[in-house]
Amino acid sequence: MYNSRLDGLTDYPFQRLSALLADISPPEGVDPIAMSIGEPQHAAPDLITVELARHAKEWNKYPPTGGTPSYRAAVADWLGRRYGLSADLIEPDIHILPVAGTREALFMAGELVVPPLKNGQIPAVLMPNPFYQVYLGSAVMAGADPIFVPATNENGFIPDFSKLEPELLDRTALAYLCSPANPQGSVATLDQLKAAITLARKHDFVLVGDECYSEIYSADPPPGLLAACDDIGRGLSNVLVFNSLSKRSSAPGLRAGFVAGDPELIEKFQRLRSHASAVQPLPVMAAATALWRDESHVDENRSLYRQKFEDAEEIFGTRFGFSKPAGGFFLWLDVGDSRDATKSLWRDGGIKVLPGAYLSRPGTDGVSPGDRYIRVALVHDRATTASGLARMFEILSKEV
């Protein structure tokens, strides 16, 4: 006896990667480099250690689901500074909910907003294709139809929900929009964000903005959904934004993030999370509060990524579809066959990457848009990353 909806889930991409490479060994005398997972390897800020020590007496207290007032205020202040929001747009106590990282919270969005039926039909959940696997899991476990919306080179790797049939949009309950995008690093413009919000309100679905890579960018700071809401001027209805300290502060182990947006949904989300979700311990929340209030470590972190993208540009030029991404820390390289390239890179160079085939599903044309690509995470120090990229370029060039 089990929930049969689980049958709709595939293995997680990294499980599939392990199976793909199980019978292949990297070459002797070569130090393997894992560039497959987006786990930041930059040193975490010292602020974390300082604040954990300062609040050590609070380990013996249960943390509240809604977090502390200081945490919510720090997030609200950061959002206001980062996006230039109107002073009255975000109220910490009604528009913000702390979460233990964003993966679980993004998954729970389906439980929060997908009804049994919408307009008498099975609800739909829209997501970019390629996509972050949690979006699919959320849709499947909520009993919805997952709809894969192309995010390809032809549309700048940003899904255009407005091209979908009105009948589909009318039964849509939830749409995920990731900007900067994982895996392609594309950034939605403010006009694109405003159009997505307007569409969500017209067809009454919830637009989820996954903005976890918002603080890693090459040139201009990416716009966000809250700024788009502010520009439209009708509050935050139908919108939820997710962000965390994992990428911004190189602190994925802290599991500190937030959801901000529609106050009615935030209230219901807190009620849902009070039944089943992990909450950050108070010392952890104190450390996270300090990080949201500090920008110096973020500037340093961003600079490190920029250096690595400059190295990547020097190594690849325009080969394999390389272009410096506007945001995030991934390369999305066109290698012809993502599985074959992944095996070659591991066998010949000890470099582990993630096949794009594991991040996408076939579209209406039968083509899976990730099949030609590999995702490469530039998360190591500059020297290690440059060494891995040079080795990668040499191997891929031989394959062509």
Image (cartoon, rainbow, N blue to C red):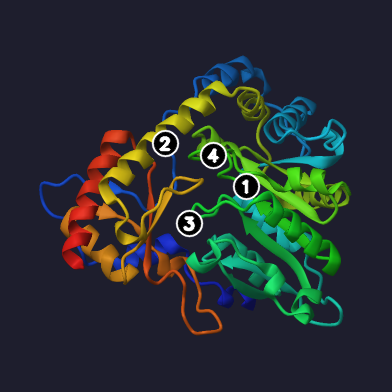
Mark 3 vs mark 2, foreground winner is 2
SS type, badge 4 = helix
Residue under the image location 79 percent in, 38 percent down: 66
In which quarter of the view is residue 150 placed?
Answer: bottom right
Which type of secondary structure does the marked residue at label 2 adopt? helix
**Secondary element at image label 1:** loop
Residue to which mark 3 is pinned? 183
**Image quadrant where one finds the N terminus:** bottom right
| Residue under numbered circle 2 | 306
| Quadrant of the image containing the C terminus | bottom left
Mark 3: secondary structure: loop
- Looking at the rendered structure, the kind of residue marked 2 is Arg
Q: Which residue is mark 4?
A: 246
Question: Which residue was labeled with disc 1?
Answer: 211
Residue 400 visible, this angle:
yes
- From where the camera sits, is residue 105 visible? no
Is 320 on the left or on the right of 69, as rendered? left
Q: Is disc 4 in contact with disc 1, using a CB cutoff of under 8 Å?
A: no
- Whole-angstrom CA distance, mark 1 to mark 3, is 13 Å
Q: Give neighbour class at mark 2: few <14, some 14-19, many 20+ (Cα, 10 Å).
A: many
Answer few, some or many: residues within 10 Å of disc 1's Cα (few below 14, many 20 plus, some between 14 and 19). Answer: many
